[in-house]
Image (spheres, rainbow, N blue to C red):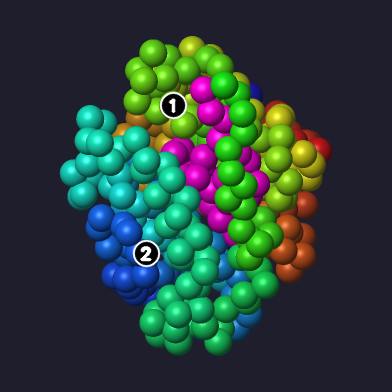
């Protein structure tokens, strides 16, 4: 396959953006304060909102290559620091680790429930935000967390679906390198991450799934197709962006120089960021031009990435 140029326009990238941090969000019962960072363009009205859930060990200070590009494209982005952030020092063997997946979900609910106050504290963004157009986006563990907000459930040891944690404020989402089904977990994952058993059959909210063709997880005995389960096993409408050369960070989503980045490729990160912006503008019925152009380019050329819809 030859590399195809992403047709999404980068003309917005001269847009000036601003970030405000930390903002503390009320989260009763949490052992550490819940803090968020808000990134937004300096100008513009009726701005859609992205609530972003980071991967394991990261924080509100990660994922700037994605977040800054989204803000430049006209989104307000809210990033919480989850309890599993390395700055909190909670290891696999910490007794709190077993319930962190639930705390992560509660974090997103707290952010969504308090979005008005959060944006008010971030320089009065509340009057510039479109509160009817809110998306959740997540990477890796954050993708599973976001998926639950979109309607997915977590199966228990007997295969019984758990609670419904979906949130009515969210009308679209994006799952990047999302956990697949739990029937092929490795012994380590089964012991330490038993909650990694998503049931996507109830994830009805429109979503884009992003997966790398070289993403081989140490948590599953399956190959890269494990990360496409959220697309194949959930109800329509869903879209899939499959990037043939992408590994787990898809070129360095959390940061090009981060230790986790095994396939550093800034152009690939830009493709992921701009494709997500284009998808959400289309899903929110704001502008379908960029997403249509991206889909047409993937269909017309023998690219290193492809798009599927159903």
Q: In which quarter of the image is residue 234?
A: top right
Residue 193 is a magenta residue: no
In depth, the one of 166 and 58 nearer the eye is 166
What span is in magenta?
Answer: 135-157
Is residue 307 at all visible to an observer of this figure? no
Q: How far apart are marks 2 and 1 (CA)?
A: 25 Å
Q: In which quarter of the image is residue 253?
A: top left
Residue 67 picture location, percent across and down: 44, 59
Residue 31's tag is none
Relative to 23, say whether 273 is above or below.
above
In depth, the one of 198 and 253 nearer the eye is 198
Residue 51 picture location, percent across and down: 50, 60
State left or right for residue 278 relative to residue 43: right
In depth, the one of 269 and 228 nearer the eye is 228
Please name the residue shown 39% across and 82% down the image: 121
Q: Quadrant of residue 280?
A: bottom right
Please name the residue shown 30% across and 38% down the image: 97
Is residue 79 at all visible to an observer of this figure? yes
The number of numbered discs placed on residues in the rendered structure image is 2
Work out whether mark 2 precedes mark 1 in sequence or the reverse, and give the earlier one: 2
Q: Name the residue under label 2.
A: 27
Q: Name the residue under label 1.
A: 194
In depth, the one of 138 and 202 nearer the eye is 202
Helix, strand or loop at label 1? It is loop
């Amino acid at each position: 396959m030859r590399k195809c140029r992403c047709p999404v326009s980068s003309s917005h990238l001269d847009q000036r953006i601003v970030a405000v941090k930390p903002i503390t969000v009320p989260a009763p019962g949490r052992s550490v304060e819940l803090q968020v960072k808000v990134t937004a363009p300096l100008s513009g009205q009726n701005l859609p909102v992205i609530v972003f859930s980071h991967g394991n060990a990261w924080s509100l200070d990660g994922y700037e290559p994605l977040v800054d590009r989204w803000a430049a494209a006209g989104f307000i982005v809210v990033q919480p620091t989850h309890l599993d952030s390395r700055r909190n020092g909670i290891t696999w063997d910490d007794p709190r680790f077993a319930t962190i997946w639930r705390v992560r979900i509660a974090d997103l609910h707290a952010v969504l429930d308090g979005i008005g106050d959060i944006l008010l504290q971030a320089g009065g963004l509340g009057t510039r935000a479109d509160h009817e157009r809110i998306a959740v986006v997540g990477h890796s563990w954050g993708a599973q967390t976001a998926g639950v907000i979109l309607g997915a459930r977590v199966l228990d040891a007997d295969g019984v679906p758990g609670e419904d944690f979906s949130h009515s404020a969210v009308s679209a989402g994006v799952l990047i390198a999302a956990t697949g089904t739990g029937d092929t977990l490795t012994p380590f994952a089964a012991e330490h991450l038993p909650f990694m058993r998503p049931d996507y059959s109830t994830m009805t909210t429109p979503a884009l799934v992003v997966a790398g063709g070289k993403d081989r997880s140490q948590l599953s005995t399956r190959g890269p197709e494990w990360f496409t389960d959220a697309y194949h096993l959930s109800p329509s409408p869903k879209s899939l962006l499959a990037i043939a050369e992408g590994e787990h960070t898809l070129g360095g989503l959390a940061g090009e120089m981060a230790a986790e980045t095994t396939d550093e490729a800034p152009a690939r990160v830009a493709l992921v960021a701009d494709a997500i912006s284009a998808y959400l503008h289309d899903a929110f019925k704001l502008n379908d031009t960029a997403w249509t152009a991206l889909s047409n380019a993937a269909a017309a050329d023998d690219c290193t990435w492809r798009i599927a819809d159903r």
